[in-house]
Amino acid sequence: MIDFETILEAYLDCRKRKRSTVGATEFELDYVHNLVELMNEVNSRQYRIGKSICFVVRYPRYREVFAGEFRDRVIHHYIALRLEPLFERIFCSRTYNCRKGKGQLAGVVQLAEDIRAESENYTKDAYVMKVDLKGFFMSIIKSKLAKMVDDFIVEHYEGDDKEDLRWLCNLVVMHRPETNCERRSPLWMWNFIPKEKSLFTNGEDRGIAIGNLFAQLFANFLLNTIDWKIDAVCVRHNRYVDDISFVSKDKEKLLSIIPMLRTELGKLGLRLNEKKFYLQHYSKGVQFTGAIIKPGRVYVANHTINSFALAVERLGNATEMGMVDDIKKNIASVNSYLGIMTHYNEYATKRRIMAKLPPKFYEYCYIEGHFDIVKLKYKYTEKAIFMNIAKNIINKRDEEDIKESSDRGGNQPASR
């Protein structure tokens, strides 16, 4: 059985950076009662996964995303807090997505270092191969994944809540959110999603919902066996979700990995995307997780630069309209891109795009450092606005006190 301390820990982990969302706020209004209720439902096996929200994102391509209710996400965090440390013991060090101390940038840096090392500081020939899995998340066989996770828990987990964890993992993996969801995007948008890439059309036992925490965690676990198979034949490899890169001096050695990959992936019901195969000399450059890696330098992919330019344009329009709330939102968007580009060789790009901001931009904002961050001028910040309001109230009160004091002094009878 799980206790209140356990479910509270999951809740506190879940609400990080989510407290401003509607679901988190509603749950927090009576979170102790809600957590006790959730705990009792799990312990009595009466817990059922609620209605999901489903929507389609259009950039960089049409994709279907599901988001569970907040109470269901608390359960996802409960699972992650227990399994993630155990998974980390068996995960290959060359896996970078959704892992503490890893991430997209770390994967790019490692690939750039692999190219430099394998080419002996760009003095020898070396080749980069990149492969991608076809419809990865939507191709996962739920029953196979559920059994793999359950077998892992049986072998490795030793907590008192072992049976609860097994039951919940099976529940979330086998859940079909498409049968109980609210579509937040127009139905016509699903016409742009291939049938095999939607939970609504890809088959009953296929696919896990993109957008849930456990999906990323379990996807890494599923491919971990593949990572170690690759590591045995090619040390310089990197994986971020379903994008896998390889670096070697021997082109034939890289090509020989493909049949092994097809075989091992086939055991999991997965396959390579034949349209996304890349094998080139390192000097040609390679795109990996949103970055373009070339000898001695790394650039941001064009689609990110285009998105940055649109964000800058929206910020410029907001400043011309003088709408401070919109300016704040667009500053956050621009700064996210500036933060990404700071890690790459993109100073000239940042300068070129930021130069398009209208003169009125500088009435509200300023740029700090070498195009490192955009900041709102102090007089437009919430603190300054609140301070001015308080100052006006204090001044008005002082004026009333002076007037009242003056009136009392004027009404006093003259001394004899």
Image (cartoon, rainbow, N blue to C red):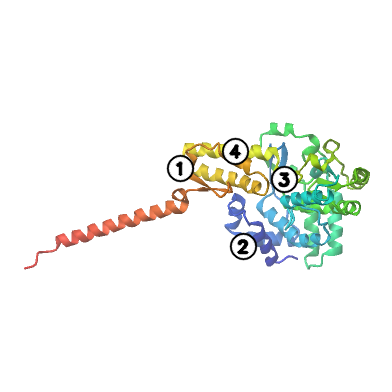
Name the mark nearer the viewer: 4 or 2: 4
Q: Nearer the viewer, residue 31 or 282?
A: 282
Give the secondary structure at mark 1: helix
Please state the horizontal and vertical placement of residue 197, each as a whole percent of the image.
78, 38
Residue drawn at 73 percent across, 65 percent down: 2
The earlier-in-sequence mark between 2 and 1 is 2
Q: Is residue 140 above or below residue 359?
A: below
What residue sits right under mark 3 in the picture? 298
Give the Cα distance between marks 4 and 2. 52 Å
Please state the horizontal and vertical placement of residue 331, each as a whole percent of the image.
55, 45
The kind of residue tagged 3 is: Val
What residue sits right under mark 1 in the picture? 363
The kind of residue tagged 4 is: Arg
Q: Is label 2 in contact with label 1 (beta carbons under 8 Å)? A: no
User: Is residue 174 in view?
Assistant: no
Give the secondary structure at mark 2: helix
Please state the horizontal and vertical placement of residue 228, each as a whole percent of the image.
88, 54
Give the Cα distance between marks 3 and 1. 34 Å
The earlier-in-sequence mark between 3 and 4 is 3
Q: Nearer the viewer, residue 124 or 154?
A: 124
Q: Is label 4 in contact with label 2 (beta carbons under 8 Å)? A: no
Give the Cα distance between marks 1 and 4. 20 Å
Give the quarter of the image for residue 329. Answer: top right
User: Is residue 283 in view?
Assistant: yes
Q: Is label 3 in contact with label 2 (beta carbons under 8 Å)? A: no
Count neighbours of disc 3 (C-alpha within 10 A) and say few if under 14, some if 14 to 19, many if 20 or more: many
Give the Cα distance between marks 2 and 1. 47 Å
Q: Quadrant of the C terminus?
A: bottom left
What residue sits right under mark 4 in the picture? 352
Q: Which mark is residue 32?
A: 2
Name the mark nearer the viewer: 2 or 1: 1
